[in-house]
Image (cartoon, coloured by chain):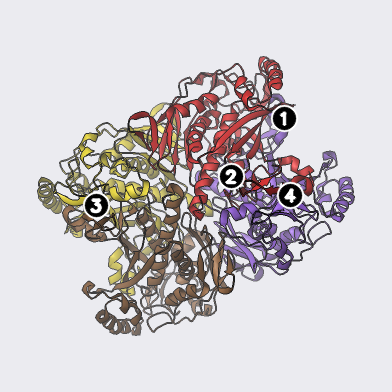
Chain colours: A purple, B red, C yellow, D brown
Amino acid sequence: MSYNTFGHMFRVTTWGESHGVAIGGIVDGCPPGIKFTTGELQEWLDKRKPGQSRFTTQRREADEVQVLSGVLSKEGSDEILITTGTPISLKIDNTDQRSKDYSNIKDRYRPGHADFAYDVKYGIRDYRGGGRSSARETAVRVAAGGIARRVVEGLFIRGALVQIGDKKINRDHWDWDEISNNPFFCPDKEMALEWETYLDHIRKKGSSIGAVIEIVADGVPAGLGAPIYAKLDQDIASHLMSINAVKGVEIGNGFEAATLSGEENADEMRAGNDGNPMFLSNNAGGILGGISTGQSVVARFAVKPTSSIHTLRKSVDAQGREVDVQTKGRHDPCVGIRAVPIGEAMVACAIADHYLMHRGQTGRI
Amino acid sequence: MSYNTFGHMFRVTTWGESHGVAIGGIVDGCPPGIKFTTGELQEWLDKRKPGQSRFTTQRREADEVQVLSGVLSKEGSDEILITTGTPISLKIDNTDQRSKDYSNIKDRYRPGHADFAYDVKYGIRDYRGGGRSSARETAVRVAAGGIARRVVEGLFIRGALVQIGDKKINRDHWDWDEISNNPFFCPDKEMALEWETYLDHIRKKGSSIGAVIEIVADGVPAGLGAPIYAKLDQDIASHLMSINAVKGVEIGNGFEAATLSGEENADEMRAGNDGNPMFLSNNAGGILGGISTGQSVVARFAVKPTSSIHTLRKSVDAQGREVDVQTKGRHDPCVGIRAVPIGEAMVACAIADHYLMHRGQTGRI
Amino acid sequence: MSYNTFGHMFRVTTWGESHGVAIGGIVDGCPPGIKFTTGELQEWLDKRKPGQSRFTTQRREADEVQVLSGVLSKEGSDEILITTGTPISLKIDNTDQRSKDYSNIKDRYRPGHADFAYDVKYGIRDYRGGGRSSARETAVRVAAGGIARRVVEGLFIRGALVQIGDKKINRDHWDWDEISNNPFFCPDKEMALEWETYLDHIRKKGSSIGAVIEIVADGVPAGLGAPIYAKLDQDIASHLMSINAVKGVEIGNGFEAATLSGEENADEMRAGNDGNPMFLSNNAGGILGGISTGQSVVARFAVKPTSSIHTLRKSVDAQGREVDVQTKGRHDPCVGIRAVPIGEAMVACAIADHYLMHRGQTGRI
Amino acid sequence: MSYNTFGHMFRVTTWGESHGVAIGGIVDGCPPGIKFTTGELQEWLDKRKPGQSRFTTQRREADEVQVLSGVLSKEGSDEILITTGTPISLKIDNTDQRSKDYSNIKDRYRPGHADFAYDVKYGIRDYRGGGRSSARETAVRVAAGGIARRVVEGLFIRGALVQIGDKKINRDHWDWDEISNNPFFCPDKEMALEWETYLDHIRKKGSSIGAVIEIVADGVPAGLGAPIYAKLDQDIASHLMSINAVKGVEIGNGFEAATLSGEENADEMRAGNDGNPMFLSNNAGGILGGISTGQSVVARFAVKPTSSIHTLRKSVDAQGREVDVQTKGRHDPCVGIRAVPIGEAMVACAIADHYLMHRGQTGRI
């Protein structure tokens, strides 16, 4: 029973609203002796930070993370922190709230937003910037993910934007090095240029567009997960679906698997040089029967277009009157962009979690 | 930490292997005073039961469910059971195991199956019929789902097969009444005929094919779910992804949302006759910000083709030797068919669970 | 959120009522490769079994445990079972129900029993033999505890009855070998004789009496537990308090610690031969700051007298009318006796659970 | 799986070490619409605050609590906060750390402390002020308990110190009004005077002494709890045992129940004026079969003497060398005193938690 917690053993509980004084979270269950620096958490956070390009919201937040507990400084080095096994408290102050921007929608239900559902559920709502439903909360996940990445030795997680609107990248062009050369985390140099023009167009007319993100985790030991109900893919799906605006998740070849025959889909094996099987393909996305195989774990998720747009939209207000709603607050023309580091963080947390669960139950790591 | 449990308050824990003496489970947290009959559980189970047509595995199981605890008979009626609020134990005997069919794959890793990952994880494996990884376990979910359907008054859940291979139904032809007129749970009469020919072809050559299933839940009260980490869509995704062979899940318009603009995607509202907003479309699939809106909850999931096929496939054995593997056991040419009642059951459990969670936290039901 | 489950990683979920067809449970999270026999579970169960002497209830139950899943037989030995890492389903049939004995108390609230509280909570109640509130459920715990004992190599758990009424054993007489020489699990030969006379007296007048049980666990590795909220002593207390009729729990010198000074209470240490500290006393009961020290873990719990007695007692019925209640069903003059193996089982489960948790988080075992 | 969380639905997760920058916690699952003021949380905290009299540690902490999320100010009143149903983040800064006091015990295992067990478990330890094992963490519980008290309408929880050393209060002298007239939360005016002299003696010689605390909760609705594993008394025992230095817990007449007969122990009932049964005694402590009866819930717990004393004690250091240890840091001669408001808070949290669980499962509140 955990409204604001995810994970079984590597557990992250977050708190905070878009326009409160701060947001934060607790990482509980982290093994002792894990080394990391605040600087590296900051680097991950900076990837998600708003206002990095004209294609993301212009809200300016330093997103400076503080580590308030659960660590000691390494002797002789203030920079390197070592986890002690106790809960790690993370805090990020909010600095650029503009709550007045939202006063006009205090009683109006923005289409595509949680406003109405929220009011029905709680009967009270912090409407400023979306309150708890704001994507601002995801900063904490990114910081927690930074620690999770350190839990499993050799784990290496990368993400890429693979589709904006109906414009998909060409997988033959995939080059991980391109990711940092454009503001989209796009691995296809040519498509990045096309997206630039396309998103400028979207942005200028105050509209928005959806996207698909792909996360690839290398260095995942075989054996993580469980046959049922604690499947690694199940938890990755749950973690990714918990990100704001996500409407679909798939593992390996995902929905395409529906179109394939058993011969086409099942990954064949040959003897590998290290004694382990070598898979001849990776349709499974590195997970079979809920358990990692040692191949790259591959997950994709679809993000809907931001519902905060400049066009007038039909709606009702809290009193049931018909109104037209226009969102004036700053927003992302394509929230999918900033979803890349968030997706990476969530996959990192899922893998760290299952690593500990596997070690606990089987002692085989 | 729950390897074999799903749900927060309406919790289902299952046990059993494909070729053990029985399978079963415990439904814990069910409210007292819920009425149901063993007969109605049996009706749901019969929808999932193998051997119903030539398009599913020929394993013959009565799948007779026994209710061992947690209920009293209604006075004057042996048939109607009333829950007492204590754990409900369900048991289904295995009767048609043919474990010998599997002796040839005891040490061979079937491509597309959990065999290798399983061995790495546990170091020991019940290879007969897939052991714990067999879809046989899903019978228990269907029985549990039958109880879940009774927890929320007015809840009505239906599922349909909407795609086999690349053959998708025509949504303009959708007729729920057709579902029971063909062996595929297909709502499109014409496509059902096409599938029949197509699947006969697949079946005869000992191959298999993937599918997509859609579940629609009507009568879901608004307010179920939470903004983060206990989102209704997140738990539906997790529940569906826990079903064997599922590789993708989506809510509402799902991956298609990636291709839409904010104007196209966000569902507008007008004042409804009952004082509640009336949505003009349902791209969201009945869930906004993780919370149900009162619209139909719509989820889809992709099932990969059975990896048990008659064609020889390249693989390795437990000793790392290269071998060719052919699956001789009975199997489903399209497991997606029997996944329909399973998906319905998992969505029913998720909704019952969130209904109780919502009532507990807010007292607003 | 777990109404009928205990444990974090070694999780036990039970089901069943006193007068249903059976009781049972699921052990989830057990490591793979653990060896045990049904025979040894039966031996533990036989210690708890009713009808073993004239000092326990005369209900006759074979208490034959069946293991329905989660194990394979060891090759060449049908007797030795090996866990596979999947859920272990345990079932014990009820055979000697005499539900008619209880018809007279169907609507009457027995003083000291859960009847009234139960009706307020659920609005429906299986009154036969106490339903879910019956100590019959504890048989499942004993079977689960039998498996837990095998999880931690070298773990050795014993229990003793140390007090009946105000008659306490003489600790200078403590002899573990005496435990099996009397029907009370009494380690003090002389006191066992005194209890025999005393309990005969209690039994003949249809009365009952309370008791105190002590559990000692040897071979508990140092390092199990956590500083806060997952303390080993906290979970032992929780597990023991979950046993029917338990009203108090203590660790080490327990309530006596309130009377001591810091000098008297804190256990001093000297260098041990094995490099580890050697404690000069064990007031702490083997747990400091919630974490095991490697000393014997010592817990005690108080069991109230059975409320089922032959004397007429003042009460009310479900309609609020004043009535006198007399319990005619078979019952235990001192339930504390049969609580010994139950307490052992619960401590075993707590230790196995924390062993896995510790291994998972720290990898230090 | 929750190392630093307690509760099922009303969940409290805490973080922080004795000598870190701050301590804090998250209250998750709190119902929306609950009103409270920071001022009232502060009042509870002030009861626990160190340095209030010469009988508690002289560490000076303002213990000022900040509420960082999960609330809105009531319109027209900045003081009154209203919960929104989202996680409530609490933070209390540490201001009076004197870490140098502890440098001499950095590598020395203080007898009676968690030092050795902690090192075995984690291999790394924040030795300053006890780190995570410090009672400082309990301030967060008290703040959380302040919110919990508001969740159940009519709930009224009080605590008293009933024993210091072997000096027990006279229950015939019990006067709740005396609690605030002495520095011990003692309900017996005469005993308070005796304790004053006695504790001065203990304090001056740098020693310490144990104590027993009693918590009484009035206004607990009947029906909270469950027959097994989620018993109200089980969770109260677990919550209380999680407090630092607690070695025993009992409900109602507790260990004394072991000495009673069924006739003496079972609380008889007569028809009450309100249609509900009126109990003629309360040996059960308001809980039968794990479920509240509507009577006062009564729990007691024993606190061991502080192990931080001025006398030299035999021990070993981290290198296994024999050393003598003397604790120089500030400490409490009787930690039992400050345990009173902590115990109240933990019982409040347990009851709020079970209130929500009961409402969720049964809808009967």
Q: Residue at x 52, y 57 (%)?
A: D29
User: Which numbered disc, 2 or 1, marks the residue that appears first in the sequence?
Assistant: 1
The reply to whether dot 1 and dot 3 touch (C-beta < 8 Å) is: no
Q: Judge depth for marks 4 and 2 and give the one in front.
A: 2
SS class, disc 2 = helix
Q: Could you say which quadrant of the image residue A108 lies in?
A: bottom right
Q: Which residue is mark 3?
A: C112
Q: Which residue is mark 4?
A: A158
Gap in Å between the C-alphas at discs 4 and 1? 38 Å
The chain under label 2 reads: B
SS class, disc 1 = helix
Q: Is residue B205 above or below residue B2?
A: above
Q: Is residue A272 above or below residue A71?
A: above
Left or right, C267 with respect to A276, comes to left
The reply to whether dot 4 and dot 1 touch (C-beta < 8 Å) is: no
Gap in Å between the C-alphas at discs 2 and 3? 42 Å
The reply to whether dot 2 and dot 3 touch (C-beta < 8 Å) is: no
The chain under label 1 reads: B
* Neighbourhood count class around disc 2 (C-alpha, 10 Å): few under 14, some 14–19, many 20 upward: many
The reply to whether dot 4 and dot 2 touch (C-beta < 8 Å) is: no
